[in-house]
Amino acid sequence: MTFAESWWGNAWIEALGSASLDPGRLSRGRAYARGGHVHDITVTPGRIGARVDGSRSRPYRTGIGLDVLSDADWDRFLTAVAAQPSHIAALLDKDMPHALVDAAAEAGVRLLPGPGELSPRCSCPDRGHPCKHAAALCYEAALLLDADPLVLLLMRGRDERALLDDLARRNAAHASRESPAVRAGVDARTALFAPPAPAALPGPLPVPRRPGIPPSLPPARRLPVAATALDLLATDAAARAHAFLTTGGDPHPGLTPWQDAVRLAATRPTSGLTATTRTLYRSLAAGTGRTPTDMARAVAAWRQGGLEGLTLLEAPWNPPAGPFDRARPALAAAGLPPLRPRHNHLTDDARGLQLRFGHDGRWYPYEADPGPDPDWWPAGPADEDPVDALSELRQRDESVARSAPKY
């Protein structure tokens, strides 16, 4: 029974299996692959690597090496492929027909690995050739090749963009040599009696009322990245494209990687911190050098006031004379407790309440457990009136206190 769907994917598996010293390890590797033990697959010239879960808590570092083609090999292969437009069309269609591989072989270039050409490596103590972890990676690599045979060409030394650009140049040069020479100028009679110019193209389609929904994803086991993160990025790309069409500009220009990561995380539903959301927070935090707690706090600030809310979370500032100075008398006149000013903050340390004055002229409420080193978190919506912002926060806290059980 085959594991991959394509003939070249199964040829990849056969290359490792033909050199295996223990068929049992291949069987266990196939079970590991089907059980979702392989994570974080990376493909680079000459190697495919991944983390593979095993018997210990920390995953093993596993890789499979494959010799890259020389420049002379690539020149012969690309020349052979460029001479046949059907070969280029097959690669663009994520296909690798036998005819393409045969053409490469006739040019003296082996694309698919032969027996013993794959070099498995693993950090596990098993000295088998291959161990079950490397075998699992081999099976997962076959699934990647199913979806895109250009992964094999990347391992052989050329990435997709460089490969297709080179093929396009060679195909154009080949076509110019095969086509008859074009005479300069046009015969007068031909120009005089030429057919009328084609009708103008129709106008652009109307912009849809809302962004489109990305297509559903295949099973996550077949994807080199987390399906949740990929779905989030696709949804965000559709929303930003729709904004470009309707407004002519990016709704979030100039964001730093950290700010954009917070913006992405804040688009998740707010009905509880689910396991999926926690995983997303950990991934985005790790990618920006922050902690999941930093991400959760920043998401709360973004939901409170967008980029301005995040800015107030991370950087105090000194507001000019005006609304900030008038806030304390207004709070005192409303019978609210006195607040200590510092920079753009007004703080009631005893009750763990704080207002932060934004560059947009609004007041952002914060709260923390009283103590010598309070941990401030955004709480409640921003308001243009400091009395309303603080009153709403105190009323909510008092309501929570009254509803708490008494012991």
Image: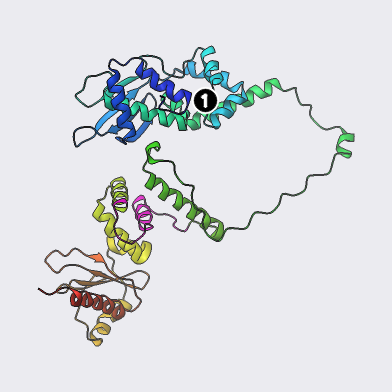
Q: Residues within 10 Å of mark 1 (few under 14, many from 20)?
A: many
Quarter of the image with the C terminus is: bottom left
**Mark 1 residue type:** Met
Q: Residue at x 84, y 41 (%)?
A: 195
Please state which of residues 211 and 54 is positioned toward the viewer in this rendering: 54
Please state which of residues 159 and 361 is positioned toward the viewer in this rendering: 159
Q: Residue at x 88, y 39 (%)?
A: 192
Whether residue 23 is visible = yes
Percent x, y for residue 327?
28, 80
Q: Residue at x 36, y 59 (%)?
A: 269
Magenta-drawn segment:
251-276
Q: Is residue 405 left or right of residue 283?
A: left
Q: Which residue is mark 1?
A: 96
Percent x, y for residue 403?
20, 75
Please state which of residues 380 and 312 is positioned toward the viewer in this rendering: 380
Q: Is residue 78 above or below residue 276?
A: above
| Furthest residue in direction left, as rendered | 407
Percent x, y for residue 95?
53, 28
Q: Quadrant of residue 227?
A: top left
Q: Is residue 280 left or right of residue 188?
A: left
